[in-house]
Amino acid sequence: MSELNSYCVGSYRNVMEYAQQVSRYGLSKMPPLIISCAITGGQHGAEANPNLPETAEAQAQSTYEAYNAGASLVHIHRRRPENLSLDSQKYEEYMEINHLVRAKCPDIIINNTCIGGRIIDIEGGSVSPLLNYSLKAKPEVASLDITTTTVRMKMKARKPPLSGRDEDYTKKFDYILNDEDAVEILRQMEENGIKPEWEMYNITDIKRLHSLVAANKAKGPHWVQMLFGGNGVQPSAHSLILASELLPADSIFSVIAIGAAQTAISTMAICMGHHIRVGLEDAVYYAPHELAKSNAQLVERAVRIARELGREVATPAQAREMLGLDKARQY
């Protein structure tokens, strides 16, 4: 394989070099495509798609199927066993699901959600503790939402046999990550041997990463995932190109395209030499009016598109090398 820095966005910014490479080789000289799979998420659940896995056992099985389909990284939200509509706040429960996934998938990269900042309750006049519940479970990678955002999400009632929410309601999500909290979360990640996944919602979030790099708080290669659609940046080629140009040169860039935008934006990213995330957290439909059958089905389509375009799909070992990770962590 090539040197690590040849996998970073800085290698794909020169338009003429990119054009000459594509003219001669197509996408065959691009870095192997890292496909992440977000299997469940922490907002909508099986009320949005009955094929979305909620229990720890169902998530582990769904991860196994996505892994066999070609995913090299799994993004995990552990749901509370007593109320599957909510995220767990116990690291022991994250440790349990990490163990179940590792038993089925010996080398997949395990990424637990962390979030990292705080939720503001405007009506109650309170601010949550740091959202860092998963870090003591020592995932190999953990997401840090390096943003400040506000969104109102329409949540459907969970009708029997589901439970946890009897009526439709609007969830208020007011989130902030200040500089001090970002540094503290990074310290905790380093203490637990965890690589941060910089999860970005806006183009301006890139400035925060540059600031942390300048302050020597963030060390490359930087694993960056940006939301396109939903409560993220507008899903367009212009947004994707601009983000690619603004990121630190030693970044490995992956797109999270939400809903109907998933296939189009993912395909653009594949063509540009970047990486992608798919899964039922981000899109519950496979096509208009057609619910996705599984996480594996979404991974299979991504693999099929990449191969049709002539780009290699990364194995977990290749993804680990690109991200600078050690051998698979045991739980």
Image: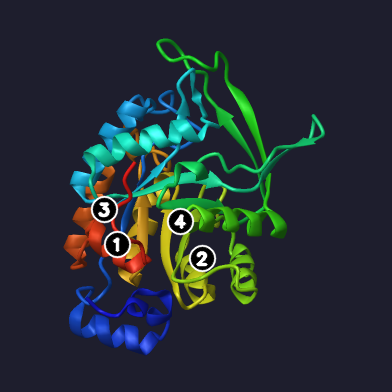
Quarter of image, res 25:
bottom left
Residue annotated with mark 1? 319
Residue annotated with mark 2? 239
Q: Percent position (x, y) of residue 271?
A: 31, 69
Tell me the quarter of the image containing the C terminus: top left
* Residues at marks 2 and 3 touching, judged by CB atoms closer than 8 Å: no
Disc 3 versus disc 1: nearer the observer: 1
Q: CA distance from mark 3 to mark 1?
A: 16 Å
Looking at the image, which is closer to me, 225 or 259? Answer: 225
Looking at the image, which is closer to me, 323 or 40? Answer: 323
Residue annotated with mark 4? 193
User: Disc 2 marks which amino acid?
Assistant: Ser
Tell me the quarter of the image containing the N terminus: bottom left
Q: Percent position (x, y) of residue 98?
A: 36, 39
- Residue at left offset 60%, top offset 48%: 116
Residue annotated with mark 3? 302
Disc 4 versus disc 1: nearer the observer: 4
Tag 4 secondary structure: loop
**Label 3 vs 4, first from the N-terminus:** 4
Vertical position of residue 1 compared to residue 255: above or below: below
